[in-house]
Structures are given as structure tokens and as C-alpha cells.
Image (cartoon, helix red, strand yellow):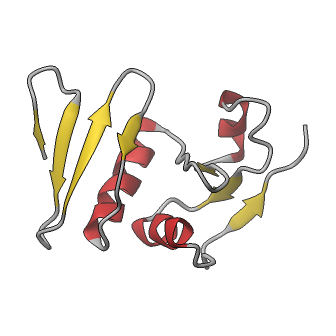
Amino acid sequence: MAADEDFGDVLIRTAEGYEAQADFNGVCIAVGRFPPGQFFDIVAELVDRLRAAVILTDRPPLLRDEADRIHLPGDAEDAVVVEITGAAIENFVSGIPTRTRCRPGRPR
């Protein structure tokens, strides 16, 4: 990874040669496009280390653990808990059903 001096914009480059621009701030890491392969492994590692959720504009949020649900706004009841792996995130972003553990959210 390469970052500018305020660590806002980061270029993520995988060993496969794919690149993605990510924006880091105090609230989130935003990525505008998703190259295939190892990129999702990097995202999964970041999500795990930061104890974060994956929030997409057109799909329910992905949670690492049911306990993470309390950090989401009330309208995120459709969040699902999955084993956070690169393959699980890539499949979810692509609309491919994941074979890892997946539980739909429960109403509060």
C-alpha cells in the first residue's frame, strides 16, 4: 500500500497487479471499485483488524459478529453475519451466494 501524507487517499496494489484507490477517514474506508482476487483478501484483513463492518450502497451490511450490530443505525436490520474472508466479501459484492456461515439479521 502507498499513502499520501495525511493517510486520506491510499493506493492498494495486490501482488496480482490490480489496484484500487481507497479513502481512509475517521469513520470509514471507502473504495469505489473492486478489482478481483487478492484485493478482497486485503479488505477482509482490514475489516478483521479494525473490527469493522462492510457496508455497500446496494446490499445489506456484512458483520463479523452479531455483537457488531449495535454499532449500526436502526435501519440496518437486514445486516448479515458472515465469516469475513476475501472470498466471502467478493461473492457478496458480486451477488454470488456465500458458502460461509451467514445469518440474516434479527429485528430489534
Q: In this view, does 41 lie above or below 63?
A: below
73 left or right of 32 in image: right
The residue furthest right is 107
Rendered-image quadrant of the C terminus = top right
Please give the count of numbered marks on the rendered protein: 0
Q: Is residue 100 left or right of residue 12?
A: right
Q: Position of residue 29 (x, y in %)?
A: 38, 37
Q: Which of 3 and 21 is in front in this view?
A: 21
Q: Residue 35: percent from the left, percent from the top?
A: 29, 67
Give whichever of 97, 59 is nearer the camera. Answer: 59
Residue 79 position in % (x across, y down):
71, 50
Name the residue rendered at 43%, 46% in the picture. Answer: 47
Judged left or right of residue 80, residue 77 is: right
Q: In which quarter of the image is residue 14?
A: bottom left
* Residue at 66% from the left image edge and 29% from the top image edge: 71
Q: Is residue 49 above or below residue 15?
A: above
Q: Which residue is drawn at 58% across and 73% down?
A: 95
Please determine whether, in this image, residue 10 is positioned above or below residue 104: above
Q: Is residue 104 left or right of residue 59?
A: right
